[in-house]
Image: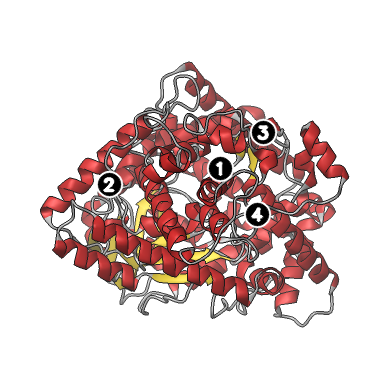
Amino acid sequence: MNLCLFLFSSAAMVLAAEGPRPVLGVDPAYMNRAAAPCDDFYAFANGSYDKVAIPGAYAAYGVNQEIDDRNWGILRDILESSAKETSAPKGSVTQRIGDFYASGMDEAAIEKAGIAPLSDIFGHIQALKSPADLAGLLAWLHSHGIRGGFAFFVVADDRDSATEIPRLYQGGLGLPEREYYFRADDASKALRGKYEAHIARMFELAGDAPTSAKAAAAQVLALETKLAEASKRLVELRDPVANYHKLKRTDLNDLAAGFNWPSYFKGIALPDAQVDVLVGQPEFLKAFARLAREVPPQDWKAYLRWNVLNATAPELSPAFEQQNFSFYGTTLSGRKEMLPRWKRVLKATDQAIGEDLGQLYVKRAFSPGAKARVLEMVRFHKEAMRMSIRQSPWMSESTKLAAYKKLDAMGVKVGYPDVWRDYSKLAIRRQPYVLNVLAARIFEFQRRMAKLGKPVDRKEWGMTPQTNNAYYNPSLNEMAFPAGILQPPFFDEKADDAVNYGALASTIGHELTHGFDDQGRQYDEHGNLKDWWAHQDVKAFKERADLVVKQYNAYEPLPGLHVNGAQSLGENIADVGGLKVSFVAYKLASKNKTLKVVDGLTPDQRFFVAFAQGWRTNVRPESLRLQVTSDVHCPIRFRVIGPVADLPEFQEAFRCKDGGKRPDAASKSVW
């Protein structure tokens, strides 16, 4: 555990003087036993941790950052050792990660190169003469990993999950989401002013005169605002049916006339055999095409130059990197300083060639025994979900049978891929850092394009092994738990079931429940977007989901700022249902075991404290505001308070009377 955390309280300083402490799933040092667990369980489990200061480089700091720091220590050693091996065979894992990391750490070379490595990209933009040229230019930029105008992906078809298909989606904004362009309060207006000033400053750093930079920034903000006007809100984007439209590629010429779609598809090398495309938001594409033909090329050039600078600023000279951080890091998130350079380059390496890095990481950080234990935990969670479905009084037998099929078919990935990604066609060398980053983006774009016409690869992972996170993919109906998150205090081979199941409730239980939340429940056992529910069951589900929306709408992270229960509904259902499922799984796993009372806490109490301490985090107010207004996850404190409010087993464990003093809980559990 990172000892810097303990320098901010007297008890912590005593512990720090004794040397490194074990990482505990339930750590009494973080608790505030004076707080009433039934009134504010987060305060009871983590109240003493509230005193820990947030380091300047972070918008929030807590358990996840501690795990990251330990993981990054391993990864740093791997990267620095690889960078020193200048004679590693060309094309080897060591050569790629060593050269990538070395190029990112060579600050003198980055400063000397300046913006020159981007001259080819800017030359393409400068050549834009008329609206007819825009399609080919956007195709070239998209294929180089530079976003703009709209988003293009290759994904599994939601209604035919065995097939890869191109998807066109709304995008092109530099602020977190559409509402940032339209809120009329003084703070929002001031933020837009700061954003425009930031764009202007980036143009100045790129060589524009101040007057020209200011004019170009105004053009960018005006164009982004028009794109935002046509964009859906976050809540609207959560409906998979409303955002699914399969068309013939030739239909785009009528749907979104004014943009040369054949030229765009030729520019990204879309195979002629690929007849169908998915369109997420037809109205957005229609508006984009109108802008493509009506907005002057000069405005588009300013907008696209900005997108290039925004996409590459972290890999350019310190002036660009610092200016980028001042807006996105400080203004939006409240961070006071950048992470150390080695951490920034490490994160870029992970994003670019993460499975190269992961091959070396898992050898040090994840044992076969750990994998076997986690797989066993997943098995008990699945059995617990089966029991929850079976006992649901509001579900018909036909829907239950279909739900069992989905549960049985749900894939599970633990630790790392069985087949590692092949980066042999990616040329990384000791060249300007930004060129290595762009090379990786080009490689990734081409790798995804190569999927078209082939079956979906169900062995592929969506996260690198060293990632401290997890996911559920509805199109593949699978859960994945990378080795990076299966670390203390979330998981410890030596910990007992009460601690491990409690700490991983927000991971295994959460991801499993995503398969049956308001979005996930719309996908069948094969991952196809399909209505497999009886009509009356859909109605009953929505009634219960509405109670969860109401419950979370009541939470107020900052004065006057409430959680948007509809925006965060899927995550809240996964939090509430995940804790319930994990508690049942813990009981199944420990049925014939004797668990001890430790530090005055019963096994059931330790389960819940481990769950709550798995969320312990201190957050800056700027970051809280950003999360509430632009994220589908609600703030961390309520990811503890909300789920325990809905669980009778918690009230029994802590002998709560009348449910405590929490905001209204959902009186009917979805799961």
Label 2: how many Cα within 10 Å (few below 14, some 14–19, many 20+)? many
Q: In which quarter of the image is residue 71?
A: bottom right
User: Where residue 77 sits: x, y (%)?
Assistant: 80, 64
Q: Mark 4 points at which residue?
A: 118
Label 1: how many Cα within 10 Å (few below 14, some 14–19, many 20+)? many
Label 1 vs label 3: CA separation?
A: 44 Å
Q: Which of marks 3 and 2 is in front?
A: 3
Q: Which of marks 2 and 4 is in front?
A: 2
- Left or right, 542 with respect to 51, comes to left
From the viewer's side, name the closer residue of 515 and 179.
515
Q: What element carries label 1?
A: helix
Amino acid on which the number 2 mark rests in the picture? Lys
Amino acid on which the number 3 mark rests in the picture? Ser
- Mark 2 or mark 4: name the one nearer the start of the chain: 4
Q: What element carries label 2?
A: helix
Q: Which of marks 1 and 3 is in front?
A: 3
Label 1 vs label 2: CA separation?
A: 23 Å
User: Where residue 226 sits: x, y (%)?
Assistant: 37, 35
Q: Is mark 4 on a helix, strand or loop?
A: helix
Residue 264 visible (yes or no) = yes
Residue 267 visible (yes or no) = no
- Left or right, 642 with respect to 28, comes to left
- Mark 1 or mark 3: name the one nearer the start of the chain: 3
Q: Mark 1 points at which residue?
A: 306
User: Where residue 564 sits: x, y (%)?
Assistant: 37, 33
User: Where residue 321 sits: x, y (%)?
Assistant: 70, 43
